[in-house]
Image: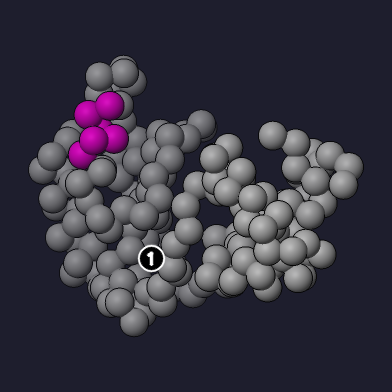
Amino acid sequence: MALDRIDRKILALLQKNATTPVAEIGRKVGLSTTPCWRRIQKMEEDGIIVRRVAVLDPKKVNAGVTVFVAIKTSEHNEKWARQFAAIIEEFTEVVEFYRMSGEVDYLMRVVVPDIAAYDHFYQRLIAKISLSDVSSSFAMSQIKYTTALPLDFIETAEA
């Protein structure tokens, strides 16, 4: 789907606040409610808008400690990778999980209330799957965090 500048504006507004009424979004981008709603629906159908969520304050839900976990493994086959991914799905503490290039094979972002909770997570993880090396780094402070993706890279159609 080719997106135009109006679609880009709609996406920017939704990334800031997905609960903004369609009429207000339409007003801000220069459309009436119905055409604005149709554009949003089309972007949902095309998979550009994957879902709309609430962003929570980690401290207020007792998940204020962020741990970046770098994992190395000696297993590099599809069966093991599928098994590992399935195991990680069981851990609600893992909020991001990536297969990496370079010296680290996998990188996870884990959120927990405290170091004891992280140790409990770690013990459960290594009981389920064999890993060559696990290195954990605790975030001391969060300097920047956003769920908004940059929209400058969208190839836009004329509107």
Q: Residue at x 89, y 42 (%)?
A: 158
- The type of residue carrying mark 1 is Thr
Q: Is residue 112 magenta?
A: no
Q: What residue is disc 1 on?
A: 66
Q: Magenta segment, which residues? A: 82-87
Q: Position of residue 34 (x, y in %)?
A: 67, 58
Total numbered circles: 1
Magenta stretch: residue 84 in it? yes
How far across and how far down the image is residue 1, in percent? 69, 34
**Of the pair 53 and 72, the residue shown nearer to us:** 53
The residue that appears at 79% across and 39% down in the rendered structure is: 155
Judged from the image, the secondary structure of the residue bearing numbered disc 1 is strand
Q: Nearer the viewer, residue 5 or 114?
A: 5
- Against 78, residue 37 (above or below) is below
Image coords of residue 105 (percent x, y): 40, 34
Query: Is 28 left or right of 64, judged from the image as shown?
Result: right
Point 49% across, 74% down: residue: 141
Q: Is residue 20 above or below residue 98?
A: below
